[in-house]
Image (cartoon, coloured by chain):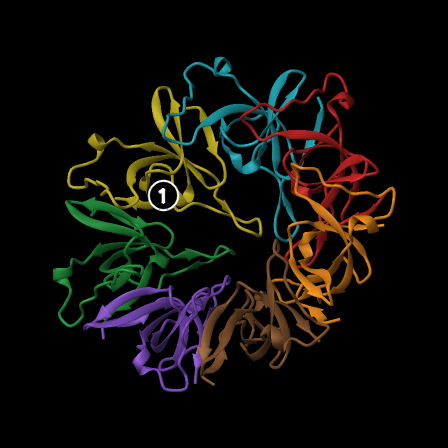
Chain colours: A green, B purple, C brown, D orange, E red, F yellow, G cyan
Amino acid sequence: MAIKKPLGDRVLVKPLEPKEVKKGEIIIPDTAKEKSQEGKVIEVGRGKMLEDGKVVPLEVKKGDRVLYKEYGGTEIKIEAEKYLILEGEDILAILK
Amino acid sequence: MAIKKPLGDRVLVKPLEPKEVKKGEIIIPDTAKEKSQEGKVIEVGRGKMLEDGKVVPLEVKKGDRVLYKEYGGTEIKIEAEKYLILEGEDILAILK
Amino acid sequence: MAIKKPLGDRVLVKPLEPKEVKKGEIIIPDTAKEKSQEGKVIEVGRGKMLEDGKVVPLEVKKGDRVLYKEYGGTEIKIEAEKYLILEGEDILAILK
Amino acid sequence: MAIKKPLGDRVLVKPLEPKEVKKGEIIIPDTAKEKSQEGKVIEVGRGKMLEDGKVVPLEVKKGDRVLYKEYGGTEIKIEAEKYLILEGEDILAILK
Amino acid sequence: MAIKKPLGDRVLVKPLEPKEVKKGEIIIPDTAKEKSQEGKVIEVGRGKMLEDGKVVPLEVKKGDRVLYKEYGGTEIKIEAEKYLILEGEDILAILK
Amino acid sequence: MAIKKPLGDRVLVKPLEPKEVKKGEIIIPDTAKEKSQEGKVIEVGRGKMLEDGKVVPLEVKKGDRVLYKEYGGTEIKIEAEKYLILEGEDILAILK
Amino acid sequence: MAIKKPLGDRVLVKPLEPKEVKKGEIIIPDTAKEKSQEGKVIEVGRGKMLEDGKVVPLEVKKGDRVLYKEYGGTEIKIEAEKYLILEGEDILAILK
């Protein structure tokens, strides 16, 4: 894996293709609203730096399945697989 | 239910269709103004992080009927039902 | 009444129609400037949260007649009557 | 007078028509720059709330003649007279 | 003089016409860049209010010759003479 | 080398051309998303100044291979070689 | 020299013409990126004021050769020579 550590409150996420989404949990965004997508957290940065320099860890951790805003982040390819580097605030929820 | 925990001050809301709105409480937004809609709070995030890292719980709790800004949030579908993930500030009021 | 509590520093206001405005107090906005309108405060939120998490109560209270910016807020109807949910800062002045 | 108290750091001002401006003090804004106008302070709000909740009184007081930005504020009419509700920062200077 | 006191960190400045600029100091702004102009400080406000309510005096004082951003400020005329009310940050430098 | 020290939290980076990227680590941005590129950190500024004046060192150090936002930064040439001066927040991750 | 003191964290800079740039250090910005230029620091302001009123000196000092953003600042002419007044953050790096 090429990514050692995302910086700040960034998170490396592997998007889950619709076929990988388990039955009974299908999440399909509607048209008028902001869209979201499922993914798996691969690596997390050290956290968000507050105004006094203190660093607060992220709410998500390695291995979490998450829902994130579809149009956020920077897309990269590692060994032909698509990954995303997201800002912490692009992640909407942790999934069961 | 697929959503375990909305992040930050986000809230998972089930929109209430007009037919579910009880009589004597019909809320119909007018044309010129920002619109709103009724919903039920299904799950709440841990709260809003202040600049010193302290987390303040939301004013709404699981089960509350709320009024929220119509154009806020991210729409998702869970087992064919529509839900919304809203930012805390998209919620305008708690309903009786 | 359907609204139990506006959230944050929001205020539920009943707009006063021009005919309800008492004589000798007619307030008619001019064309070039931001417009305002009179209303009565029906319910107030708990107040504005400061950056340290402290909540400061609003300057207006239930029953106050107020002047507010005409284009602010979210319009709702409760039992066929028009109401507004305003942010605290949309309210310009308390009227006598 | 219908206005009891402007809210926050707002100020109720009576614009002074050019004819009321005393001789030797004529203030005529040029074309390319932001324009200003003279007025008299009728009522002041309690002041500006700082981030820690402390309220700082305004620099102007009831009765002051002031110079304010021409395009700021909300215009109202009270008993056929034009008044303005200005934000504290729309007032540029106190006049002699 | 009609202006008693500029408010906040504002400064009353008398623009110096090119002919008044001393020889060997001609300051002519180029075309592509933000332009500047020379002036003389006539009156200064009490200073800039910080977030904790403390007021910090301006770096310029009455009588200083200054260089300011050409497109800042509000232009006024006092007894047929042109003056400017500038924000403190519109002033770029003190001149010798 | 002409650059002695980048200022603040800026970082001097030498972009790595695709041919220099090691096998099994090819990073190719897709079309719809923000793009990124690999580079090597040549020099780092002293860090980011917080609101209380304290300076926090950067997460990256001289010699790190990093992934940065493609459209950030200022491009310079030193002895015919292309370099970039990036803001600290333009750097997305440290690479292995 | 007409400039006595730049205000705040501003810096008076003498741009260096390409011909003055020493060999082996030619810095030529490319087309797609933000451009930069070399200059010499002639005078510095007292520094940046923090939110608590404390003033932090600049990282650059009189005599430093610096790289700055090409489109920042205000251009002035002093005795037929071109100078720039830059904000502290327009300066990217100190050069050797």
The structure residue drawn at horizontal position 25% and vertical position 30%, both measured from the top left corner, is: F17
The structure residue drawn at horizontal position 23% and vertical position 45%, both measured from the top left corner, is: A76
Q: Is residue C77 above or below residue D54?
A: below
**For this rendering, which residue is in front, G96 or G36?**
G36
Is residue C90 shown to the viewer in this render? yes
Q: Which residue is mark 1?
A: F91
Is residue A2 shown to the viewer in this render? no
Describe residue C38's horizontal placement relative to residue G95 as left or right. right
Quarter in which the N terminus of chain E is drawn: top right
Task: Name the element at disc 1.
Answer: strand
Q: Is residue F32 above or below residue E15?
A: below
Q: Position of residue C84 (x, y in %)?
A: 51, 73
Quarter in which the C terminus of chain E is drawn: top right
In the displayed image of the protein, which residue is found farthest to the right? D23
Q: Residue B92, located in which quarter of the rendered image?
A: bottom left
Q: Position of residue E24 (x, y in %)?
A: 73, 16
* Chain containing mark 1: F
Describe residue F35's horizontal placement relative to residue D55 as left or right. left
Mark 1: amino acid = Ile
Q: Position of residue B36 (x, y in %)?
A: 41, 70
Q: Position of residue C86 (x, y in %)?
A: 53, 70
**For this rendering, which residue is in front, A18 or B48?**
A18
The structure residue drawn at horizontal position 67% and vertical position 63%, both measured from the top left corner, is: D76
> Counting other residues with Cα less than 10 Å from the Cα at mark 1, is it few (<14), some (14-19), or many (20 or more)?
many
